[in-house]
Amino acid sequence: MFPDTLSNTIWTLRNALKKNKVPIWKAVLKELSSSRSNRRQVNVGQLAHVTKDKEVVIVPGKILGSGEISHKLTIWCLSISEAAASKVLDAGGKIMGLDSLIKKFPDGKGVRIIG
């Protein structure tokens, strides 16, 4: 199942890049096209440290549950642990699908890549 999910994600990013020609989608596409061993892993505590309230972030890898977060984030990531998802949602944050994120921020303004 994982390769299909990844290939669908890459396909969605390619379409967004063709349609909007925005560098952020190209950067995320490049990250996800690289070797799996090079993908980012970010803890919730690290996210809390480098982000501000109500920021929109992309993690082209996995978010892990170590640490605490106390502010709202809108997140898209390739994968997230149950503990991390629970902590983000309990803090008032949202975990968006890639299609929704691209629709809401087609130009990529206000979206950061973290990791």
Image (cartoon, rainbow, N blue to C red):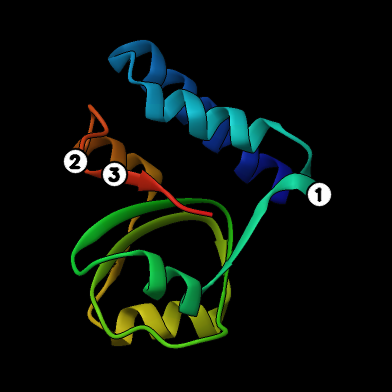
| Nearer-N-terminus badge (3/1) | 1
The x and y percentages for residue 73 are: 28, 67
Q: Quadrant of residue 68?
A: bottom left
Q: Residues within 10 Å of mark 3 (few under 14, many from 20)?
A: some
What is the number of the mark on residue 81? none
SS at circle 1: helix
Marks 3 and 2: CB-CB under 8 Å? no
The x and y percentages for residue 90 are: 31, 87
Residue sitting nearer the eye, 63 or 50:
50
Side of 99 where 77 appears, left or right: right
SS at circle 2: helix
Question: Distance between the Cα atoms at labels 3 and 2?
Answer: 11 Å
| Nearer-N-terminus badge (1/2) | 1
What is the number of the mark on residue 37? 1
Q: Amino acid at mark 3?
A: Val
The correct choice, above or below, for 5 with respect to 67 in the image is above
The residue identified by callout 3 is: 111
Q: Residues within 10 Å of mark 1 (few under 14, many from 20)?
A: few
Q: Amino acid at mark 2?
A: Lys
Q: Quadrant of residue 89?
A: bottom left
The residue identified by callout 2 is: 104
Residue 12 can be seen in this image: yes
The correct choice, above or below, for 114 with respect to 8 in the image is below
Marks 1 and 2: CB-CB under 8 Å? no
Residue occupying image coordinates x 40% and y 73%: 49
SS at circle 3: strand
Q: Residues within 10 Å of mark 2 (few under 14, many from 20)?
A: few
The correct choice, above or below, for 14 with respect to 109 in the image is above
